[in-house]
Image (tube, helix red, strand yellow):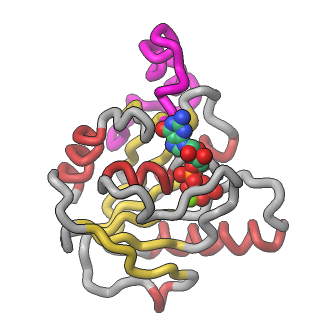
Amino acid sequence: MKVTDSEFVISAVSEKQYPNDDLPEFALAGRSNVGKSSLINTIVNRRKLARTSQQPGKTQTLNFYKVNNLLYLVDVPGYGYAKVSKKQREKFGEMIQDYLETRADLKGLVLLVDARHDPTKDDISMFEYAQYLDIPILVVATKMDKLKKMEASQIKQKIGKSLNLKRKNVSFLPFSSVAKLNVDKFWDWIEAHE
Ligand SMILES: Nc1nc2c(ncn2[C@@H]2O[C@H](COP(=O)(O)OP(=O)(O)OP(=O)(O)O)[C@@H](O)[C@H]2O)c(=O)[nH]1
Ligand SMILES: [Mg+2]
């Protein structure tokens, strides 16, 4: 897909704020700092559409981005960031859960994991949870530019030890925002699930 138009639409904390034009939607979830906002900027080819930061915990609301007036990408607050208060974490959890469980327009979950590390407990929980809800999942290994060639060639096996990538409705994609790796393949998955 060629992106000709992308816009930030709304930062939402509750259902009544979600867009209501019934376009297909794809949520991006993952540990704080894994590169969700960077991935959005990379795939729409804009440097600063989604706000990124070296400090984890930047994205604290559900941020809706509309692409080509055709679909939404939804940037979800990152989990696993210790400095966010317990109360705040519970609030995020509820918000994300409500969203994933009730949103009819949701066509898929993009689960970002850091290519350099084994998936965390939280990554595994999110994966299992989306499976349970029967939401198609694209597992994206981010920051592939940081891996040596040998490690890069074995990334699917490595991630596959913690997340069962062979299940139905589960796909896998190595990715790098720095190297713009696999941008087209990302869109292929989206288009297949619209
Ligand atoms: N080397 C490398 N760095 C990356 C890549 N993607 C993101 N980063 C860096 O990782 C840091 C976090 O990126 P963000 O996109 O803000 O991460 P996020 O997942 O949106 O974080 P939260 O909003 O806190 O949940 C930034 O310093 C980015 O520059 C990548 O593909 N390669
Ligand atoms: Mg972010």
Q: Position of residue 119 (x, y in %)?
A: 62, 34
Q: What residue occupies the far front of the structure in this picture?
A: 47
Q: What residue occupies the far top of the structure in this picture?
A: 150
Mark yes or no: residue 129 visible.
no
Q: Is residue 81 left or right of residue 107?
A: right
Snapshot quadrant of residue 178: top left
Q: Residue at x 42, y 31 (%)?
A: 165
In the rendered view, tell whether residue 70 sits above or below residue 19.
Answer: above
Q: Position of residue 14 (x, y in %)?
A: 55, 85
Q: Is residue 63 left or right of residue 86?
A: left
Q: Position of residue 27 (x, y in %)?
A: 43, 61
Is residue 70 one of those drawn in magenta?
Answer: no
Q: Position of residue 69 (x, y in %)?
A: 20, 73
Q: Residue at x 25, y 45 (%)?
A: 189
Q: Residue at x 19, y 52 (%)?
A: 191
Q: Is residue 191 left or right of residue 138?
A: left
Q: Quadrant of the C terminus?
A: bottom left
Q: Which residues are magenta?
A: 142-171
